[in-house]
Image (cartoon, rainbow, N blue to C red):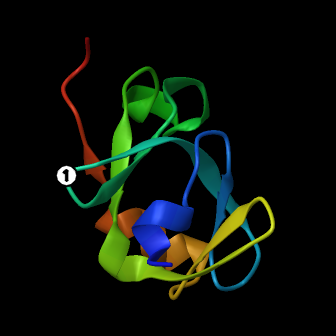
Amino acid sequence: MSASTAIREHMEVIGADGVHIGTVDKVEDGRIKLTKRDSGEGSHRGHHHYISMALVAETEGNKVRLSANADVAVTFEEESKPD
């Protein structure tokens, strides 16, 4: 099973260090779309952020573990325009 088919809505996304990054809304265009309520801080709140599937190391239970630590992984996030 590929990583993209193993990833489901509401799974927790964590860095390689186990630190919470966000919650999966869905997989879209080869990226993980994070929920708005759990995506970004400050001026980045209130809209979706995306993480490339290339950063996914594995899925384990209800978690998606990335290959980078959380503080590094968030620098790779892409953001959508506010709805």
The amino acid pointed to by label 1 is: Asp
> In the visual, does 40 lie left or right of 62?
left
> In the visual, does 74 lie left or right of 83?
right
> In the visual, does 10 lie left or right of 44?
right
Tag 1, which secondary structure? Answer: loop
Residue at 46% across, 27% down: 45
Residue matched to label 1: 29
Q: Is residue 72 above or below residue 27?
A: below
**Front in this rendered view, residue 30 or 41:** 30
Please state, as top left, top right, bottom left or bottom right, where the C terminus lies in the image. top left
Residue at 31% across, 68% down: 76
Residue 11 x, y percent position in the rendering: 68, 50
**Front in this rendered view, residue 54 or 80:** 54
Q: Is residue 77 above or below residue 26?
A: below
Residue 59 x, y percent position in the rendering: 65, 75
Residue at 52% across, 88% down: 67
Q: Quadrant of residue 30?
A: bottom left
Other residues around mark 1 within 10 Å, as few (<14) / some (14–19) / many (≥20): few
Residue 46 x, y percent position in the rendering: 44, 20
> In the visual, does 81 lie left or right of 43?
left
